[in-house]
């Protein structure tokens, strides 16, 4: 667990370093600060603190270890041998002596003999100035920028080959939330059973696709497909399959794995869908008690517009799907979600579109395009409750290339709002426009009023909702190679903090691109009532791919 903080230092040199003739001398620097619990804002007494000072030549000196007092304050000093300029000392005060300050100060915090952190951060404790305000140091001393509170403990578990998606559900019926991950390039679904305290088992792997670049499990959902009250698995597959001794490319299908009742699963049942499935979601569209599927397909042909296709698979009540039909939902559909958007007690479908409907792709010149020419769009398909839909409603949004969408009551007014994760546009010869999250306020009738756009540091690939800080407002977690939080302020605004965990146990501004967080699932893994996160660390194409379990410690 890593938490970057800000430290208001009082760093005092006993002597100075200058230029000219040098002699050895003893030097002293003192680091002062306060440690405050980030959940209670109370000072923390009895913590062991050691500071490390890094200098411009790359050398490091360490202070002695000191204890925080009843105010959470500490004062740590380092003494070392340096050289000074004798000419400078003789010419003072007419000659200005140059004081070399450390280029970085790092602290190590120890509680009850256990190292809490040792890389420039203070774990659960915020470092403040004398007035109790978190702040960045001034002068020549620099610390990493402030990050989100250390609400999560991270544990990394192995999966296989490009983990693409994750889900949380009680798969073995013991009352605990378990985890399943889709390993895209091996074609596996990795099932992790929970011990009840948030510790997961080694993964049991089940085949959803042939894998190894022939066919890939790109997404997954869980639900009771056959009505036996056990939670089953459905994997969305894209790729090639054997056809009469050869291969056919870009086919799509869903793999249904029925639960045996103990968290183990029967071999897959395959149901064909359209070419190039991208994403899907599950819900009871015809209200017969069995969940149905909405699948987004968007095959691309070189030099032509994308061919939109939304495939609806109705559950047959016996563990399979039938009665399929297609819908159109704007240009280049990509992400999809279900929610009751118009308060008629029926599930509606919302689809993200990479481009708005009025964009002429054949005559589009990206080199001369304006910012708004890159806007994405949403298509709303109002459900009638019988598996059919009313006329689609389209809405242009600010998010560029919106990959994902989630629904929730973000402003607490009882209506459903939407948030989309936008990839942004990164071009070599065309403009570069920022990635980010668009939050749209629902009006309660299936349409949306105000939109607020929140830029992210990197391409936003997924967004999920949960009350992560236990203040009864719904926050947003954004997958953007690392974890970013849009913290709900309770007044219809959000505060973005884009410095968090990167999928490899590190707090990083850039994330670990080879092992990046690309999808999230939300659920209570340790039974404490707080929403936890599981991340798919999805861009490693070898067997080192992983998932990250982030246990929420906010209420502790």
Image (cartoon, rainbow, N blue to C red):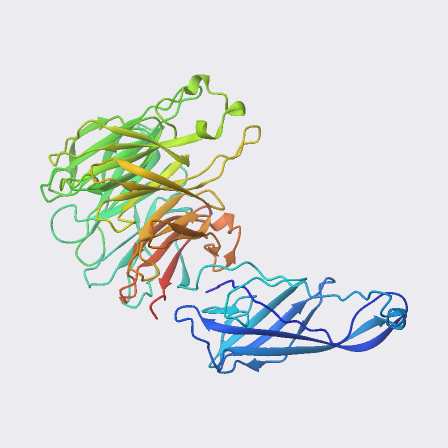
Q: Nearer the viewer, residue 325 or 508?
A: 508
Is residue 246 shown left or right of residue 67? Answer: left
Q: Nearer the viewer, residue 301 or 19?
A: 19
Residue 52: image x %, image y %?
Answer: 63, 71
Q: Residue at x 66, y 62 (%)?
A: 139
Q: Is residue 497 above or below residue 554?
A: above
Residue 374: image x %, image y %?
Answer: 44, 29
Q: Residue at x 33, y 47 (%)?
A: 188
Residue at the limit of the structure toward the left, as seen here? 288
Residue 191 in view of the camera: no
Residue at the limit of the structure toward the front, as seen here? 94
Residue 169 appears in which quarter of the rendering? bottom left
Q: Nearer the viewer, residue 466 or 310?
A: 466
Q: Nearer the viewer, residue 77 or 92?
A: 92
Q: Is residue 318 above or below residue 66?
A: above
Residue 430: image x %, image y %?
Answer: 54, 28
Q: Quadrant of the C terminus?
A: bottom left
Is residue 504 shown left or right of residue 96? Answer: left
Q: Is residue 215 above or below residue 198?
A: above
Residue 398: image x %, image y %?
Answer: 40, 35
Q: Is residue 518 above or below residue 115?
A: above
Residue 327 in view of the camera: yes
Q: How many marks?
A: 0
Residue at the limit of the structure toward the top, as seen here? 363
């Amino acid at each position: 667990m890593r938490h970057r903080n800000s430290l208001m230092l009082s760093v005092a040199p006993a002597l100075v370093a200058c230029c000219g003739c040098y002699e050895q001398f003893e030097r002293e620097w003192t680091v002062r600060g306060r440690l405050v619990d980030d959940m209670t804002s109370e000072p923390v007494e009895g913590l062991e603190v050691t500071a490390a000072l890094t200098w411009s030549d790359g050398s490091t000196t360490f202070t002695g270890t000191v204890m925080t007092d009843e105010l959470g304050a500490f004062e740590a000093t380092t003494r070392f041998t340096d050289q000074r300029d004798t000419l400078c000392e003789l010419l003072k005060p007419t000659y200005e002596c140059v004081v070399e300050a450390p280029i970085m100060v790092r602290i190590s915090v120890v509680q009850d003999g256990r190292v809490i952190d040792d890389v420039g951060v203070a774990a659960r404790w915020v470092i403040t100035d004398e007035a109790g305000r978190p702040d960045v140091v001034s002068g020549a001393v620099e610390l990493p920028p402030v990050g989100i509170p250390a609400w999560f403990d991270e544990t990394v578990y192995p999966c296989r080959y490009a983990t693409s998606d994750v889900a949380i559900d009680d798969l073995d019926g013991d009352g605990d939330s378990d985890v399943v991950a889709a390993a895209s390039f091996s074609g596996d679904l990795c099932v992790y059973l929970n011990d009840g305290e948030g510790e997961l088992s080694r993964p049991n792997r089940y085949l959803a696709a042939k894998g190894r670049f022939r066919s890939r499990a790109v997404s997954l959902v869980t639900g009771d497909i056959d009505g036996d009250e056990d939670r089953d698995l459905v994997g969305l597959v894209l790729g090639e399959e054997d056809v009469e001794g050869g291969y056919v490319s870009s086919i799509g299908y869903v793999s249904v794995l029925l639960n045996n009742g103990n968290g183990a699963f029967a071999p897959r049942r395959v149901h064909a869908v359209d070419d190039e499935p991208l994403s899907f979601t599950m819900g009871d569209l015809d209200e017969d008690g069995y969940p149905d599927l909405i699948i987004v397909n968007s095959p691309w042909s070189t030099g032509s517009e994308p061919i939109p296709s939304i495939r609806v698979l109705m559950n047959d009540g016996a563990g399979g799907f039938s009665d399929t039909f297609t819908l159109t939902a704007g240009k280049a559909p990509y992400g999809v979600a279900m929610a009751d958007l118009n308060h008629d007690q029926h599930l509606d479908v919302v689809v993200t579109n990479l481009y708005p409907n009025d964009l002429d792709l054949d005559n589009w010149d990206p080199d001369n395009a304006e910012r708004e020419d890159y806007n994405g769009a949403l298509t709303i398909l109002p459900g009638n409750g019988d598996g059919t839909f009313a006329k689609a409603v389209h809405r242009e949004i600010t998010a560029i290339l919106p990959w994902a969408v989630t629904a929730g009551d973000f402003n607490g007014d009882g209506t459903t709002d939407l948030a989309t994760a936008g990839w942004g546009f990164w071009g070599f010869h065309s403009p570069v426009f920022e990635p980010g999250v668009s939050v749209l306020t629902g009006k309660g009738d299936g349409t949306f009023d105000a939109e607020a756009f929140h830029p992210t540091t990197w391409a936003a690939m997924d967004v999920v909702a949960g009350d992560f800080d236990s203040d009864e407002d719904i926050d947003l977690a954004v997958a953007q190679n690392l974890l970013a939080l849009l913290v709900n302020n309770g007044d219809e605004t959000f505060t973005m903090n884009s410095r968090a965990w990167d999928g490899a146990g590190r707090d990083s501004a850039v994330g670990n691109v080879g092992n990046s967080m690309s999808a999230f699932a939300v659920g209570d893994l340790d039974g404490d009532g707080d929403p936890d996160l599981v991340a798919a660390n999805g861009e490693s194409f070898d067997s080192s791919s992983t998932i990250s379990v982030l246990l929420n410690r906010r209420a502790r």
